[in-house]
Image (cartoon, grey):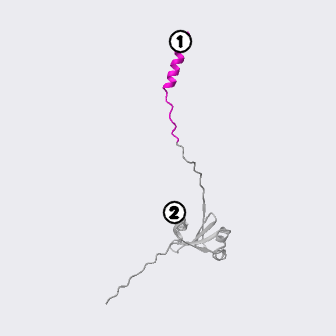
Amino acid sequence: MNCALVIAVCLIGQILGMTTIPSPTHHHHAHESNEFDSAMFYYDAHSHEMVMKLGQNCYIEKLKTSVRPQVHTPEGLLSMENNLMFLVAKGVHKQMSHDDVNGLSMHVESMCAGQDVFVVSRPHHHHSTTVGVIG
């Protein structure tokens, strides 16, 4: 009986020893923190401006007459928001006073109260022309 018990324990030990324990697949990386940022957009129908509030700044883009109707469709509004984000990243920024903002729209001034306000526009590319001398 003891011999059978010893054999059973040995067999169980061998069976457990034969199973492989998977190596950990998790690689240890430097722990990165989560990031969160949000922007609020507003189209002011009175001044025809698209406004984005981001962090401590407000950015204003004066919309051309030809693109204003697009703001009333979901695709058009999204396109204008994307364009404004592009101008914030790559465009020309001109700081604006809150008195000037209030002159444009009290709604925009209310949205941008306490923020730095910038008018954004596309960079202007100046082309030089060369005039040849005929002689």
Quadrant in which the C terminus is drawn: bottom left
Q: Is residue 49 left or right of residue 15?
A: right
Mark nearer the viewer, 1 or 2: 1
Residue underneath mark 1? 4
Instruction: Give the main secondary structure, helix, strand or loop, of the magenta stretch.
Output: helix
Q: Position of residue 110 (x, y in %)?
A: 67, 69
Q: Position of residue 74 (x, y in %)?
A: 54, 62
Residue name at image x 52 percent, y 20 percent: 12
Label 1 is placed on what type of residue?
A: Ala
The mark found on residue 75 in the picture is 2
> Depth check: 113 or 13 in front?
13
* Secondary structure at numbered mark 2: helix
How packed is label 2: few (under 14 Cα within 10 Å), some, or many (20 or more)? few
* Residue at (51, 31) in percent of width and height: 21
Q: Nearer the viewer, residue 26 or 90?
A: 26
Residue 135 located within the stretch drawn in magenta: no
Quarter of the image with the N terminus is: top right
Residue 78 vertical position relative to residue 49 in the rendered view, above or below: above
Magenta-highlighted residues: 1-26
Query: How many discs mark residues in the rendered view?
Result: 2
Q: Residue furthest bottom?
A: 135
Secondary structure beneath dot 1 equals helix
Measure the alpha-carbon separation of dots 1 and 2.
78 Å
Residue type (three-letter) at the residue carrying disc 2: Glu
